[in-house]
Image (cartoon, rainbow, N blue to C red):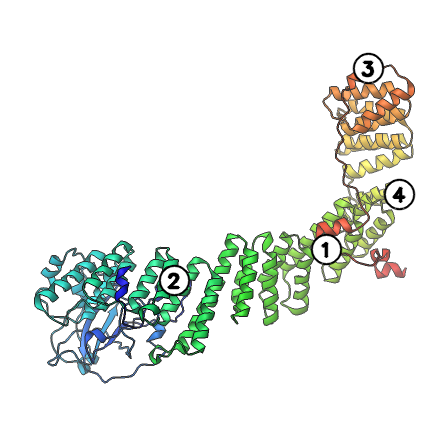
Amino acid sequence: MPYLNVWSSRTNCLISEQDLASSSTSVFTWRRTESCVLAYSLSHNFTSDHVSIRNKPKFRNQDFCLRTESVPFRPQKKDSFGPSCALAQASGEKDIDCDIVKQNSLSFTSGEGGVEGFTCVQLEEKGDLTNNVEYDDVVSEEDEAGIVKGEKVDVRALAQSLHFVKTADEVDEVLKDKVELPLQVYSSMIRGFGKDKKLNSAMALVEWLRRRRGKDNIGSISLNVFIYNSLLGAIKEAGKYDFVDKVMDDMVSEGVQPNVVTYNTLMRTYIEQGRELEALKLFREMPKKGLTPSPASYSTALFAYRRLEDGFGAITFFVETRERYQNGEIGNIEEENWEDEFAKLENFIVRICYQVMRQWLVKGENANTNVLKLLTDMDRARLQLSRAEYERLVWACTREEHYVVAKELYNRIRERDTDISLSVCNHIIWLMGKAKKWWAALEIYEDLLDKGPQPNNMSYELIVSHFNILLSAARKRGIWRWGVRLLNKMEEKGLKPSSREWNAVLVACSKASETSAAVQIFRRMVEKGEKPTVISYGALLSALEKGKLYDEALQVWKHMIKVGIEPNLYAYTIMASIYTAQGKFNIVDSIIKEMVTTGVEPTVVTFNAIISGCARNGMESVAYEWFQRMKTQNITPNEVSYEVLIEALANDGKPRLAYELYVRALTEGLSLSTKAYDAVISSTQAYGASIDLSILGPRPPEKKKRVQIRKSLSEFCHIADVPRRSRPFDREEIFTAQTKGT
């Protein structure tokens, strides 16, 4: 951009708090007052004046008048108005002392010796500028005591009269008879037009000033850098970025040298256009042009990194700036109060890092790696997030893979603070469970018990739900040992297992054929005051059946009936299988009839249990009779029914009957196992049966083997992500102290 080649002068930059609204933060603290005042020191000429702004004026919502009054000069505190407003809208004024004057109305008065003392603009919220609301120009008692009586100018009415002009000729029609006003009035109106999206009015006013200077040769009305900075600010506010190059070309043609404010405004304009890299390039060019960046320049550069979501670049930039500040290379201008401004920059970079990490977690792209690395870089740069920011980052961790970041954030909070939000801990427990890191979730719960805050119902329900998941995994795989340990761990942490948890362990014992363990778990369940359910009795009956403890099973059955628990299909099926193994088919028949009477209809599972019991005990003919009986109950046999009976008949020396059943299964569209096919072939060959084997078709493919129930913990520990114990399992763990004592 050739117009930047004329850059030479230096001044401080003011950009508004609103400019950083998109970053959800501001480097600087703003205090709102009932009225906002623009205070100018006019002890020299207008080109050296400075403006500090609180709550930038917006014409359509505010009334204002300008007046000149003679009041004693009062030095301004450094931290109340000057560079601490370093992000106020680019206005081009130097940073000198200014004061805040609070009044009801202000007017402009021209004195004999020109304008002296303070020129103040007060903004009062009177309504929309476009509305025809009369402005009360009555001077208060306070004004009468401190102003020079003279002609007043209603600046609000003046701005309203220019609100819809589009050309310089239209401006001239309004202002040709007006007394010459300070340039601050024009720059304020230009910025206000930008806020009201009336850029045509702003540009028409600037063009009128250019014409008037050439016509009247009035030196005080000159298109200086402050007017152009105001126009650039108006363009930025209006979002009409196409006019930026034209304004910069006009500055070059007018011989107006851009200053730091101009440069900062261009940077902000580029950022709003999504050209953050070009904005950073402008910042790096400033020293080459003989300009010293202001605190707002550094803030704007950091904001560019924020928009780029480049937390690493932002930290590098800040560290370099801090080193230069500590070495005395920057911050030597007393008026800028760099001690305060640098502290604000440090707060800003911390806020940027927080926002960038939160954005990474929301997007989920390489979030773990980037967040952990940025946290490490912050540690090296001696930058620390607050506890509240750490906790908000934890809330942003919602995906399974985020558990790594959540655990790191949790550890950081615990290391530096004694307090932590219980809701945050509950969220981490939930996230650990989602990521199948249940043991890590238990560690969080243990910290709540040991360090606080005390867990609530949500904590309890979350951790119990995780135990249920682990117990369900142990139940499905028959890993009864881990089920027992989980019950012990629950009780150790003050969690009372419900029947659901006890039943999971009982079923695991049944699947693993651990009859003794099932009996002891059932007894312990009763001792703990938990009432067994039909599932509890069914699991115990199944374990007793597998241990061939038929008499004990009958006692359990009778006890179940005695306490008023209605048997379900599973319990009836177990009892039918037990009596089948004993050859008491009259009782089996009674059970089937009782099931029908009580409304529990027998299913193919019930008949398969009876057929399997007959086959295991060498009663193949009886098995075939029960297979035939399924028709009378309108129950269709499934693959298990055919496979068990075919294997039993083939082994019993009845290859032709086995062959016929196999063909019948194929006719019904069933897909039998390879084992049944091989049994038919082997029996046919062994007994020399003359049958057409081609009807059997090709040998069926091998079916996937069922998951083998392991008594080892290796598989479960891998699946459930729980630690293994080095020492062998102690069977006494299933006993309570009371049980062992008896």
Circle 4 is placed at which residue position? 547
Residue 720 to residue 311: above or below: above
Q: Give whichever of discs 4 and 3 has the lower sequence position.
A: 4
CB contact under 8 Å: marks 4 and 2: no
Residue 506 to residue 614: above or below: below
What label sits on residue 280 in the rendered view? 2
Under circle 1, the secondary element is: loop
**What residue sits 46% from the left and 60% below the top?**
310
Is residue 208 visible in the rendered image? The answer is yes
Q: Nearer the viewer, mark 1 or mark 4?
A: 1
Given the image, on which type of amino acid does mark 4 rest?
Answer: Gly
Residue situated in front as seen by the camera: 106 or 579: 106
Q: Give whichever of discs 4 and 2 has the lower sequence position.
A: 2
**What residue sits 27% from the left and 54% below the top?**
242
Circle 3 is placed at which residue position? 692
Q: Nearer the viewer, mark 1 or mark 3?
A: 3
Task: Point out the image quarter for the C terminus.
Answer: bottom right
From mark 1 to mark 4, how far is it between C-alphas? Answer: 30 Å
From mark 1 to mark 3, how far is it between C-alphas? Answer: 56 Å
Q: Give whichever of discs 1 and 2 has the lower sequence position.
A: 2
Under circle 2, the secondary element is: helix
CB contact under 8 Å: marks 1 and 3: no
Task: Point out the image quarter for the N terminus.
Answer: bottom left
Badge 2: how crowded within 10 Å, few (<14), some, or many (20+)?
A: many
Badge 1: how crowded within 10 Å, few (<14), some, or many (20+)?
A: some
**What residue sits 83% from the left and 49% below the top?**
518
Q: For this view, does 37 lie left or right of residue 532?
A: left
